[in-house]
Image: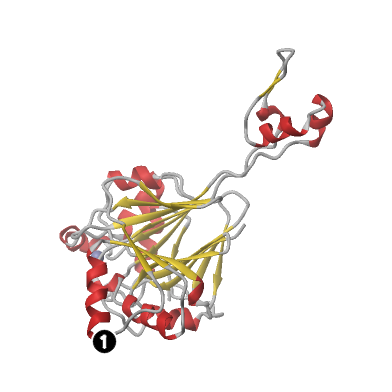
Amino acid sequence: MNFEIQILGCGAATPTAKHMPTSQLVNVHDKLFLVDCGEGTQIQIRRYKVKFQKIDHIFISHLHGDHFFGLVGLLSSMHLLGRTKQLTIFAPKQLEAILEVQFEASQTRLSFPIKFVDSIVKEKTLLLEDKTLEIYAFPLKHRVPCSGFLFQEKPRKAKIRKAFIKLYDLGIEEMVNIKNRTNVERPNGEVISWKECTYDDPPVKSYAFCSDTAPSPKVEDVIKDVTLLYHEATFHSSLKDRAVTTFHSTSLDAGSIAAKCNVGHLVIGHFSSRYMDKSILLEEALTQFERTSCANEGLKFVLKENPGEIEIQDMNRSKSNCE
Ligand SMILES: [Zn+2]
């Protein structure tokens, strides 16, 4: 059951020779979700050889350009390549009109339907679910309405220990109940506990995307104990004042939030272009939380079955990270 996050862009504000604006692909159980779509996203998708027609759901955190300016181009390419499948876009509701103006001006009638869902919420809200996954939006603290996104596996069916099938001579219906975490009550009054008969659960994996945001206790409540947290660290704490006035976080903030929320692993991103060398930001976050990595275009964070284990793959096939 795969659960992977691939960084397509992790720069703030403007594209640079080093970084693209925010965008990432979240692949959970072979379903592909795009989170934010800064300028150049479709080029990144091609560079990393991802089939973008497989993306059926796009999540846009907010309407600052570095988080959605790549969208009209991506949609246009999907159209030109003959997409017919519906696409669902979770975004602030003004986005629909913004896109309409652009397609109207070019007299483009898209070859596929788009369903728009407002992603701006007052509290943690379920946006999408299937048999194995739930995706929530939650409010971030930014200059414009902005949402974070939480991807969370649903608990799987409980796994029965074979010895207990024999011990209690479990029937098929009884086994179904136990797998569904329900105690079995027999006509003679005997109660068989599902917990006793099953293996301990592997922990469910989860991923929280927090960009852009100032530190906020409300956000911390939602992201507690997530397996992987992507948190913006636009500035070093030497520019704390700038972070406060622009409703962003520092690398010190990101590290201390990860520690406070007991997350499994932290990835910092949304770097201001003034930092040619990201190690200053990584080092500061590491003073607060040791399991921290720097985002970089092409890095893939793979959540493993072993609790808390993260494998980092470099899709550029080079070792570069926080150079
Ligand atoms: Zn922003």
Mark 1 residue element: loop
Q: Could you say which quadrant of the image residue 114 lies in?
A: bottom left
Figure quarter occupied by ligand 1: bottom left
- Percent position of residue 97, x then y: 22, 70
**Whether residue 315 is visible:** yes
Q: Nearer the viewer, residue 100 or 124?
A: 100
Whether residue 19 appears in this view of the structure is: no
Count of numbered marks: 1
Give the position of the N terminus as an image quadrant: bottom right
| Residue behind label 1 places its C-beta within 8 angstroms of ligand 1 | no
- Amino acid, disc 1: Ser
| Scheme of colours in the image | secondary structure
What residue is at 70 percent from the left and 34 percent from the top?
A: 198
Choose top left, top right, bottom left or bottom right for residue 181.
Answer: top right
Label 1 Cα crowd, 10 Å radius (few <14 / some 14-19 / many 20+)? few
119 w.r.t. 42: above or below: above
Nearer to the camera, 265 or 194: 194
Q: In this view of the protein, which residue sits in the foreground, 261 or 69?
A: 69
Residue under the point 26% across and 87% down: 106
Q: x%, y% of residue 54?
A: 51, 72
From the top left corner, tell me how far across and down residue 293 is, in percent: 45, 63
Image quadrant occupied by the C terminus = bottom left
Residue occupying the point 55% across, 50% down:
131
Q: Residue furthest top?
A: 188
Residue linked to disc 1: 106
158 to 75, vertically: above or below? above
